[in-house]
Image: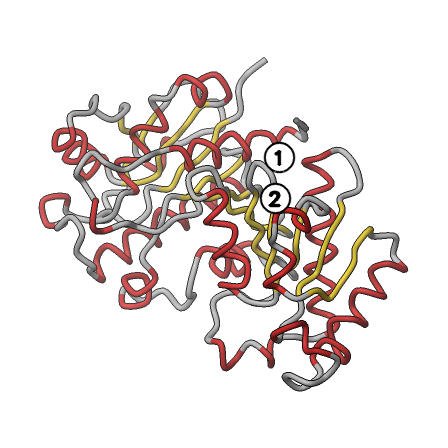
Amino acid sequence: MSKPVVAITMGDPAGVGPEVCLRAVADPRVGAACVPVIVGDRGVLARVASAVGLAPPPAAMDPEAWTADLTAPAVVDMRAIDAAAVVPGEMAPACGRAAAAYIDAAIAAALDGRAAAVATAPIHKEALRLGGCPHPGHTEIFAAATGAARVCMILVGPDLAVSFVTVHVGYADVPAGLTVERIGEVIDLTAETIGRLLGRKPRIGVCGLNPHAGEHGLFGRREEQRLIAPAVDAARRRGIDLTGPWPADAIFTPEQRARYDAIVCMYHDQGHIPFKMLAFDTGVNVTAGLPIVRTSVDHGTAFDIAWTGRARPTSLIQAILLGVRLAEGRRP
């Protein structure tokens, strides 16, 4: 039986993406699970390999030569940036444009069946914006490119998953992004994705927005009573096993955390901070709701250690392996 092809986007060329891609592709667990294909620039990968003492990157091929029947690791050489011009650890619009080109090519390959899943290395959001990309991050790029009607970000770790109603918006804009419908969508996508991974109905907790989950309307504008509680009640009627809204500063304590397989959060840092404390190296970002499988590292470009040999590939390896599981419908 042939192994699935996983497209691995190189991320921002000036960050740790090239190094973690090289290390991940060389990992025997990755080779045993799939045919890894780095979508990036071989010139950058070769520079990084030389700088940090790694083996040269896999053989290069033109994007036009990428077919669905690959059997060996490869680099789809996008030639999106001059490798000699990349300054490690420096934000540059050219790097943002290159990172967007890698993502676009990988999405196209997944949509037409040349790749079973896409695993993404980190991008730099400011470089992406200055490079002309209209979207703030991976989640939004994938949603727009695939025409997905509803998506959400889910961070999956060994012991916990967290999902998000709002993600890349400022705190002042979070309340406007909360509706009964949107909260319900995220609950549904969380139940579907985590249930698929566990092979059973997941137990889900839902955070409130305000301190102490609003303290019965004392804090905030009664978002818990007006928006979150109705969405929770409606999801229960749909057969989902969940409770909430709960104070976010209490639900992540060890005793409470053990009650849930996933926790739905209202905004970015509400879930990212506790999750990264628990699973910084092993967490995987999954975009739920897409017609393709997309997983990602749960860390940034780490410009401070780019091209130094200190980047750990653990999160990318886990993202690749989880992508294979999702693509094949396998469970633990």
Quadrant, the C terminus = top right
Q: Residue, x 71% and y 47% (percent of image)? A: 260
Location of residue 330 by image quarter? top right
Q: Secondary structure at mark 2?
A: loop
Q: Is residue 292 toward the left or the right of residue 315 in the image?
A: right
Q: Which mark is residue 160?
A: 2
Q: Is residue 165 above or below residue 24?
A: below
Q: Is residue 243 toward the left or the right of residue 189 in the image?
A: right
Location of residue 228 by image quarter? bottom right
Q: Residue, x 43% and y 66% (percent of image)? A: 135
Where is residue 248? Give x, y as percent.
Answer: 61, 64
Q: Secondary structure at mark 1?
A: helix
Location of residue 207 by image quarter? bottom right
Q: Is residue 41 toward the left or the right of residue 171 in the image?
A: left
Q: Amino acid at mark 1?
A: Leu
Q: Amino acid at mark 2?
A: Leu
Quadrant, the N terminus = top right
Where is residue 155? Give x, y as percent.
Answer: 55, 48
* Distance between mark 2 and mark 1 Cα atoms: 17 Å
Where is residue 153? Give x, y as percent.
Answer: 56, 55
Q: Residue, x 68% and y 31% (percent of image)? A: 329
> Would you name the residue on which mark 1 appears?
326
